[in-house]
Image: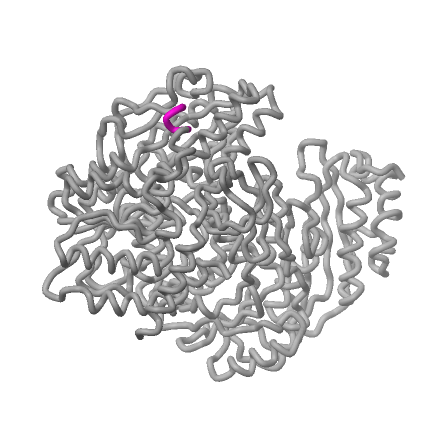
């Protein structure tokens, strides 16, 4: 094969067939894809089905600690996991710009496939389109995940959130956001921060199983902790109070934020979950999280308070004062003031 | 109005160089602080070092913080 | 460990607050203006504003160079981009969401196809111009004295390397005139200000001595402060001590960074390249002579206003109901504005004071002022 994607590869004919057999099937090989049908017939499932979809666009596509491919797997698997669902199947949709490097495409596919194999979550169907040069930013990936919640197993219920519930996170915030931002050549900075991109379904599943009274879980991706906490607070019409001195953040991440004027609570995370749980179980939940991969730095960071006229997220500062954590308003840009 | 952060000068090359803060290094211009030396602390604003911090005053500040603490 | 990490910590700050509580005279009020928006931001972000003795009230100053700009720099920029497809506009991230008088913004213009980019350092703009002679690069330059020297270094680089496609749209403002405006103008007559927390980073450039004539003429103490909560608390202590002894001088709390003379190299650049505009209309403070800078005539080929015939407007309108001008003038508190915390929030700002993280409205919102009893 040539070393670059061309328009023929997306046209569904021989060229695509070659691409499929040379690039996709070798890494994703499973009984579903071998059929090469228009769709894949899946087995029955005794329980409720959960469906989620996400599209992934990141620049640069390969960054410290991860890649677009790894993100595409983890992002969707984590969305299922926080819903209490066991991830069962994935779909993979690609939009590739004409001229894209075949070597890079293979590397993202390998990243996804390695994780599929490790966690036994197959890609069962997919689609590839190629757009003209200049009409797409290299590579966009969509993954849709199908998961299952067996009958009798718990799932999130925001309505159950009550005053006194604790807010827990599994580790340091902002690593992914800074790992990606640090690669922008115009920022001229270097740091050792790696993305926290990781599949959290084992951690989440174990928590749902051991602590079925957990109210809900969310993964604070784009918009960070600020976004997710405002979303939940708004859904359940309560006030959340988090404590600045309890929020885990690496010094280098904090320093980049100071230097560039970024707000750490708004930075993206790709290996974090926020758990809202009854207060009497919070310490046990943290202990359980700390004993598992991706949970070592788990921490209670705040609590749910009685709802008032406005639902909101308050932050108690290190000095004991208070400020509000607003919804992020958009893309973070370096500030001068 | 003026987000300027203190960082340590780790390398100088002509008018520019790098500063370091908690393991993060950043390229900055030293053109506005021509007398800067490696090891100095500078204030960085929009990619420029605007001022060299006085080591003596830095130490004095830290001593005062301790002093105020002791009297509590 | 970073000095800021030490000075942000409660162990540094709380002892100063205790001293401050002992120092204040409980029989009087202290009205202190923190001139600089960065100080407002720091008071609120750290929660220090909640810890002050009850008889100290802070009057937020107009020291937010984004907030006090009229609408025309952004309007002219959008217009320029629409008329000239070979122009790329660079500016600081802070400017991207600033609403014009008719509700447009650079961010909206970008979504319509305008070539607008945010940058961290002005050198990025001149470097891009060097690599791309086929386009015209305009740098929308804003800020007080702290941010002026970087613009001028970029301009110097363009001159030295003969980069003929780099232009500066100069909207830099003069802190001294803003301070004088506050001290002299009617708009502040009904608010007695007992003292000022002086701008710590402007002073890096101007030097602390720059503020001495104000302290002398208007008999108000000025303490030049750093930006950590420790610095601010200590500056308040120093101000209260002066006020209690009826003193009025310039003290420097931020000694590790600020000296009397300032940054001579930066001042030289300013003298070389800039001259003062005859007048400029500030949002909130109105028309002020010699309060804003423009490029000297001999640098006309680099001056976007000259090259692209951009015109400054004297009109400042606001969105219906927006009280930004009054807030900046100190005539109204953000909580008096009917849009505050309703239609106007940081997520959906109607006026500049809510867009900029240094604006008083943004600060009040973050401090949850709209939620506290008696403030609405």
Q: Is residue C104 visible?
A: yes
Q: Is residue A86 magenta?
A: no
Q: Which residues are magenta?
A: C269-273
- The answer to which of C161 and C353 lies nearer the viewer is C161
Task: Tell me which colouring the rendered structure shows.
Answer: one colour
Q: Is residue A327 left or right of residue C102?
A: right
Coordinates of residue C66 in the picture (x, y in percent): 36, 39
Coordinates of residue C347 in the picture (x, y in percent): 40, 49
The main secondary structure of the magenta stretch is helix
Point out the image quarter for the C terminus of chain A.
top left
- The answer to which of A23 and C188 lies nearer the viewer is C188
| Number of numbered labels in the structure image | 0
State which quadrant residue A313 falls in.
bottom left
Coordinates of residue B2 in the picture (x, y in percent): 39, 44
Q: Is residue C334 left or right of residue A280?
A: left
Q: Is residue C275 above or below residue A4?
A: above
Q: Is residue C271 magenta?
A: yes
Q: Is residue A34 left or right of residue C43?
A: right
Q: Is residue C247 above or below residue A207?
A: above
Q: Is residue A24 above or below residue A213?
A: above
Give me the residue at 42% from left, 28% from top: C269
Coordinates of residue C284 in the picture (x, y in percent): 23, 37
Give me the residue at 69% from left, 48% from top: A141
Q: Is residue C338 visible?
A: no
Q: Is residue C173 above or below residue C31?
A: above
Point out the image quarter for the N terminus of chain A.
top right
- The answer to which of A250 and A141 lies nearer the viewer is A250
State which quadrant residue C46 falls in.
bottom left
Give me the residue at 25% from left, 68% from top: C19
């Amino acid at each position: 094969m040539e070393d670059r994607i061309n328009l023929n590869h997306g046209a569904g004919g021989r060229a695509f067939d070659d691409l499929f057999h040379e690039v996709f099937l070798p890494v994703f090989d499973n009984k579903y894809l071998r059929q090469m049908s228009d769709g894949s017939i899946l087995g029955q499932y005794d329980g409720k089905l959960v469906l989620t979809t996400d599209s992934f666009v990141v620049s640069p596509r390969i960054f410290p600690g991860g890649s677009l491919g790894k993100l595409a797997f983890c992002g969707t698997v984590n969305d299922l996991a926080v819903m209490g669902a066991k991830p069962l199947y994935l779909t993979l949709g690609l939009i590739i710009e004409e001229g894209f490097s075949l070597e890079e495409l293979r590397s993202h596919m390998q990243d996804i496939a390695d994780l599929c194999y490790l966690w036994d979550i197959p890609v069962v169907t997919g689609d590839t389109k190629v757009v003209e040069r200049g009409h797409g930013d290299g590579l966009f990936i969509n993954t849709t995940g199908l998961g299952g919640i067996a009958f009798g197993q718990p799932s999130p219920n925001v309505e159950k959130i009550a005053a006194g519930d604790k807010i827990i996170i599994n580790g340091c915030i902002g690593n992914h956001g800074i790992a990606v931002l640090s690669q922008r050549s115009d920022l001229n900075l270097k740091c050792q921060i790696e993305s926290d991109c990781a599949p959290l379904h084992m951690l989440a599943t174990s928590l749902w199983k051991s602590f079925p009274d957990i109210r809900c879980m969310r993964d604070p991706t784009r918009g960070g902790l600020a976004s997710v906490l405002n979303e939940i607070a708004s859904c359940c019409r309560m006030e959340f109070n988090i404590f600045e001195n309890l929020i885990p953040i690496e010094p280098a991440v904090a320093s980049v934020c100071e230097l560039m004027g970024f707000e750490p609570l708004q930075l993206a995370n790709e290996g974090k979950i926020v758990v809202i749980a009854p207060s009497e179980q919070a310490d046990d939940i943290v202990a359980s999280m700390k004993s598992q991969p991706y949970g070592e730095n788990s921490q209670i960071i705040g609590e749910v308070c009685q709802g008032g006229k406005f639902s909101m997220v308050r932050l108690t500062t290190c000095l004991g004062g208070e400020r509000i954590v607003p919804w992020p308003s958009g893309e973070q840009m370096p500030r001068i003031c | 109005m003026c987000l300027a952060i203190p960082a340590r000068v780790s390398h100088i090359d002509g008018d520019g160089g790098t500063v370091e803060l908690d393991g993060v290094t950043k390229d900055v211009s030293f053109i506005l602080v021509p007398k800067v030396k490696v090891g100095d602390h500078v204030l960085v604003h929009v990619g420029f070092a605007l001022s060299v911090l006085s080591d003596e005053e830095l130490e004095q500040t830290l001593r005062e913080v301790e002093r105020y603490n002791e009297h509590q | 460990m970073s000095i800021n990490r030490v000075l942000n910590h409660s162990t540094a700050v709380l002892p100063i607050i205790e001293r401050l509580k002992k120092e204040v005279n409980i029989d009087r009020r202290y009205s202190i203006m923190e001139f600089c928006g960065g100080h407002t931001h720091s008071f609120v972000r750290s929660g220090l504003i909640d810890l002050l003795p009850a008889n100290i009230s802070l009057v937020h100053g107009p020291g937010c160079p984004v907030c006090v700009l009229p609408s025309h720099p952004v309007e002219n920029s959008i217009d320029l981009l629409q008329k000239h497809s070979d122009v790329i506009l660079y500016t600081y991230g802070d400017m991207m969401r600033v609403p014009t008088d008719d509700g447009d913004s650079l961010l909206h213009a970008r979504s319509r196809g305008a070539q607008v980019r945010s940058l961290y350092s002005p050198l990025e703009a001149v470097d891009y111009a060097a690599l791309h002679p086929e386009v015209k690069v305009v740098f929308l330059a804003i800020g007080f004295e702290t941010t002026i020297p970087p613009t001028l270094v970029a301009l110097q680089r363009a001159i030295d390397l003969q980069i003929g496609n780099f232009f500066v749209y100069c909207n830099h403002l003069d802190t001294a005139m803003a301070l004088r405006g506050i001290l002299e103008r009617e708009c502040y007559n009904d608010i007695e200000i007992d003292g000022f927390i002086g701008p710590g980073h402007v002073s890096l450039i101007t030097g602390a001595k720059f503020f001495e004539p104000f302290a002398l003429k208007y008999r108000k103490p000025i303490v030049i402060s750093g930006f950590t909560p420790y610095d601010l608390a200590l500056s308040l202590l120093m101000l209260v001590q002066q006020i209690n002894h009826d003193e009025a001088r310039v003290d420097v709390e931020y000694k590790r960074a600020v000296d009397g003379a300032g940054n001579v190299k930066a001042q030289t650049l300013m003298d070389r390249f800039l001259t003062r505009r005859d007048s400029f209309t500030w949002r909130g403070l109105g028309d002020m002579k010699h309060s804003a800078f423009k490029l000297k005539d001999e640098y006309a080929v680099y001056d976007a206003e000259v090259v692209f015939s951009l015109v400054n407007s004297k009109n400042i309108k606001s969105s219906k109901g927006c009280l930004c001008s009054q807030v900046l003038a100190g005539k109204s508190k953000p909580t008096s504005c009917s849009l505050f915390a309703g239609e106007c929030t940081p997520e959906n700002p109607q006026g500049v004071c809510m867009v900029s993280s240094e604006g008083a409205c943004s600060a009040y919102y973050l401090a949850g002022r709209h939620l506290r009893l008696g403030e609405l």
